Image (tube, grey):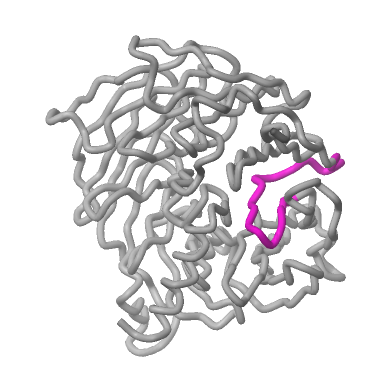
Amino acid sequence: MSSFRRVLGIIVFALLLSGCWPTPGQGPDRRSFNASESTLTPERVGGLTELFRAPLAGGAGPPVVTTDGLFVRTGLSIAAFEPDDGASRWTVPLPAAGWEDPSTTISDPHIVGGGLRQVVATVTTVREEGIHESQLVTLATGSGSLTRHPAAGTLSSLRGTSAATVDFAPGFGIESTSLQLTGLDGTKTWGGLSFEARGGIASLGEGDLYLATGDQVQEYDTTAECPPYFGTQPPLICQTTWVRPIGSPVTPVVIGDVNTVYVGSTNAVVYALNRSAGGFRWRSVVGSPITRPPALGGGTLFVASADGRVSALPAAGCGSPLCDVQWSTATGSEITVQPAIAGRVVYVGSADGTVKAFDAAGCGTSTCAPIWTVNTGSPVTGGLAVANGRLYVGTANAVVAYGLPPS
């Protein structure tokens, strides 16, 4: 292993040990699991109270948090707050002059720790004539100082300092998707075009990239260069290692162990796929469409479905192609974000503004009641993050923090 890759491993390892939530889904594997949390346990979570509420007129995207701060997307800006008391630190609009096109979007922020201390995001505009413009931006966590570099699409996943961007480009009778890995300075390290994908969301593994695109999952080997289409000349065309059609729209991929990745689908089925070839390992029917990625922690897969139910499944399967749900919750308001797992507790947020916590071990019966419930006062649209004894919730008009009162 090169010294560069060793440094990246140290950075990621340090983030995990510090109990942070540095990216949406907690990390590039999208497991939404903070294994370091030890404060908010099933025995204590019932004491959670609101610590602060930071109003945001543009709503809050998925909160991400490290010891360097709390960061959220709001409208076309990234906002930073003190993670302990919610004091505003800075708000930086990302579009530059000339980017006022209504199709301009920005990605959710991701945090690079270690000595870098940067927030990473992209700003992308798709103009009517089919021209795409993208920038990879980095902001200093303390000051919000902004640096811009050209990018090839929207930030989808970040592993270490490698950013995966995806951009679907219909037009001129040819449809293609740009898949690219870049460093934080915008330098391309892998990528090209794919004629097999129609946009999508990437999950970046160690040497591989999983793309949830339409109704299928695709795997790409990022250790092999994408070959040129015309002899030795660009464009470069990235070939899939495998493709797994599902038959209905799929969620972003959750990367499990060395053998398995997981994906949910609007056909109300969650699938465990073999990483090496994309074959089905097992599947489970949960009874309602799945539109958010499952969460994976402690050997259990937690699946949120459109009927407001959370279903717990054995991540290793059940020895059969079709697995039963171990336990589930009652139905309720639609769950609008990926579940979050920390401290042996699983949290979900709903369209009616409710956040519920459940004991991740279940309750000894087939249907489990929440061990804590709160109404945030606004739909949960931006996701959940659990770090350092705090639960952060992104809603349609604020980022809200919950914690235990001083003892």
State the image quarter where residue 66 is shown: bottom right
Residue farthest toward the left in the current orientation of the protein: 319
Is 60 magenta? The answer is: yes
Is 395 magenta? The answer is: no
Residue 381 position (above or below residue 244):
above
Residue 23 position (above or below residue 334):
below
Residue farthest toward the bottom in the current orientation of the protein: 232
Q: x and y percent of residue 32 in the render?
A: 48, 44
Residue 315 position (above or below residue 73):
above
State the image quarter where residue 264 is shown: top left
Residue placed at 58% from the left, 42% from the top?
386
Q: Does the rendering let one see residue 131? A: no
**Quadrant into which the C terminus falls:** top right
Q: Give the range drawn in magenta.
A: 55-73
Q: Does the rendering let one see residue 383? A: yes
Residue placed at 64% from the left, 66% from the top?
120
**Quadrant into which the N terminus falls:** bottom left
Q: Which of 266 and 254 is in front in this view?
A: 254
Residue placed at 73% from the left, 67% from the top?
141
